[in-house]
Image (tube, rainbow, N blue to C red):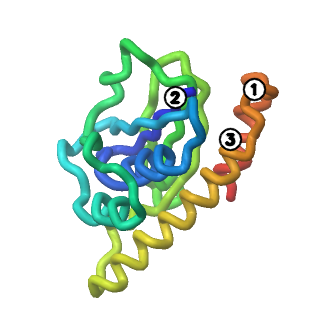
Amino acid sequence: MKVLFMCTANSCRSVLCEGLFNLMAPQGLSAASAGSMPSGRLNPRAVSTLQALGADTSALFSKGSDSFAEHPPEVVITVCDQAAGEPCPVYFGPALKSHWGLADPSEVTGSPEQIQAAFDATVIHIRQRLTAFFALDLNALGPAELKLALNRIGDL
């Protein structure tokens, strides 16, 4: 199963999700990320945070969802922050869709320690959700059940 994480710029939150998913995923599951308006660059702190956790960042780059037209994902998860009024990207392909909102740690201001603490908190939140995702019996869930389970995970 391939999962696509989407946010607006594909530079921070969706990239953190992609890197952590692929670091934690069991065999047969993989993730990618994209943005509705890709910035063309990765947030350096997102990359260094992933590297500090042991994630391979060599294949990460900022891209749009059109990159997946030939090989569409089975699941698309948006990670924009609707609570902050941020618009979420729309994926028009035939994938099951869910929303796992995350505050953008790259918007935090303060000391380097405070900024890193925001990234670390985001990583903890993503890991909590991914742990719940990997605990699902994906072979036993139909599309409607999987969507419901994903939506519940988004509420964690």
> Rounded to the nearest whole Å, what is the CA distance between mark 3 and mark 2?
14 Å
Mark earlier in primary sequence (1, 3):
1
Where is residue 19? Give x, y as percent: 41, 49
Query: Would you place residue 38 above or below residue 114 in this image?
Result: above
Quadrant assignment for the N terminus: top right
Query: Would you place residue 3 above or below residue 72 in this image?
Result: below
Q: How many marks?
A: 3
> Rounded to the nearest whole Å, what is the CA distance between mark 2 and mark 1?
14 Å
Q: Residue at x 50, y 47 (%)?
A: 21
Which residue bears the numbered disc 1? 139
Quadrant assignment for the C terminus: bottom right
Residue 2: assigned label:
2
Tell whether label 2 touches label 3 (CB within 8 Å): no
Element under disc 1? loop
Which residue bears the numbered disc 3? 150
Q: Quadrant of residue 40?
A: top left
> Which mark's residue is nearer the viewer, 3 or 2?
2
Query: Would you place residue 19 above or below residue 156 in this image?
Result: above
Q: Residues within 10 Å of mark 3 (few under 14, many from 20)?
A: many
User: Would residue 71 be found to the left or right of residue 58 on screen?
Assistant: right
User: Would residue 10 be found to the left or right of residue 75 on screen?
Assistant: left
Name the residue type under label 2. Answer: Lys
Name the residue type under label 3. Answer: Leu
> Rounded to the nearest whole Å, what is the CA distance between mark 1 and mark 3?
14 Å
